[in-house]
Image (cartoon, rainbow, N blue to C red):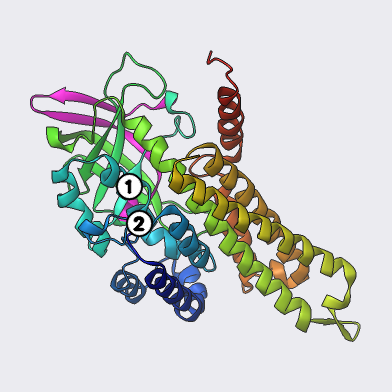
Amino acid sequence: MSAVDAEDFAQVRDAVRQLVREVVVPLEERIELEDRIPDGLRARAAEMGLFGYALPEEYGGLGVTMSEDVELAMELGYTTPAFRSLFGTNNGIAGQVIARFGSAEQKQAWLPGLAEGRLIGSFALTEAEAGSDPAGLRTTARRDGDGWLLDGTKRYITNAPIADLFVVFARSDPAERGGRGISSFIVAATTPGLTVGPRDAKMGQSGAWTAEVVLDGVRVPADALVGEEGRGYAKALTVLSRGRLHIAALCVGMAQRVLDESVGYAASAHQGGAPIGRFQLVQALLADMHAELLAGRAMVRDVAAGYDSGADTSIGPSSAKLFCTEMVGRAVDRAVQVHGGLGYLRSTPVERFYRDARLFRLYEGTSEVQRVIIGSGLLREAGMPRT
């Protein structure tokens, strides 16, 4: 059940749409050039409660359902992904681990700050040899008196340069393989031995910072362990499933933006004395973008309803991420094609979105991994035994 009634949520959604289209969109070029979100925009987002809309109401959040989450994500996807990324891990994969699996003390210690935007959370799972497959996870957690010692290196960690806390995944039982024997810990960014590397230079999504995180003899107390020892990867899968559906909705928002840009350009740009929108092959590009956008939006809403009911919290979200991330890839490519040579210039929004969109097919599980999740899940439902 939603913690927000329908009328209040509609007002929240409309306020987010207004902020995105009237405030963030005009700042996109500045964010791209400076590779940062302006401090004033971060303060505005915090004031509106965007850092905690998916966190529990009792800790300062709005406690939105998945169906409400995707509606907000589709609005946020209309602009640079860096804006949503600023508060995405608070609401998503980092904040959800604490909200769903943390102790009462951990929730009280961290969630209010995350919800208010005073704190930035980061999700430290990925490693050089452990991206989509946990079997390669090398970071270790070994008992040390009444606490734990963490050692290892994490890669591509979103918000690491500005994070106040990390949800770190480490192998606590070296005898186990794969996802077993992995535990999760809350580690403050100021903990001795934790070092954040320089910001990664990326193809796109400027303003959304990622970096390497090194843990060298990082000692944390026993109460830093989140939930049951050795069950950390199961927690990661749970929150990643929600995150995948959220990303699918972001892609719908981005597809809407590049379609709007393309329709506007085709209606106004002239070749041979007529708008290029008169050419049927241009119309075909717009038609394909629109049809796939409608399919993606309907899919996201349907899967979100199934997630909220508990009917499908795995195959559906993976299917939505697979389809929508691939769909937006086709949409941005067509948008550049509609714009012609202008679409290849850095001064054109569709060029930026072309680069930004490429990441969606990689992070929180590649398209190939989603296909494995979907296929194996369907076969398990049909009764095929695990190997």
Left or right: where does residue 37 sit relative to residue 327?
left
79 falls in the magenta region: no
Which residue in the protein does label 2 denote?
54
The span shown in magenta is 136-161
Considering every residue shown, the one lying at the far right of the view is 272
| Image coordinates for residue 88, horizontal then vertical, percent | 39, 56
155 falls in the magenta region: yes
Name the image quarter holding residue 377. top right
**Above or below: residue 154 compared with residue 331:** above
In the image, 5 versus 351, the foreground residue is 5
| Image coordinates for residue 384, horizontal then vertical, percent | 59, 17
Q: Secondary structure at mark 2?
A: loop
> Which amino acid type is marked by label 1?
Gln
Q: Is residue 19 visible?
A: yes
**Residue contact between numbered discs 2 and 1, judged by CB atoms under 8 Å:** yes
Q: Secondary structure at mark 1?
A: helix
| Image coordinates for residue 269, horizontal then vertical, percent | 78, 81
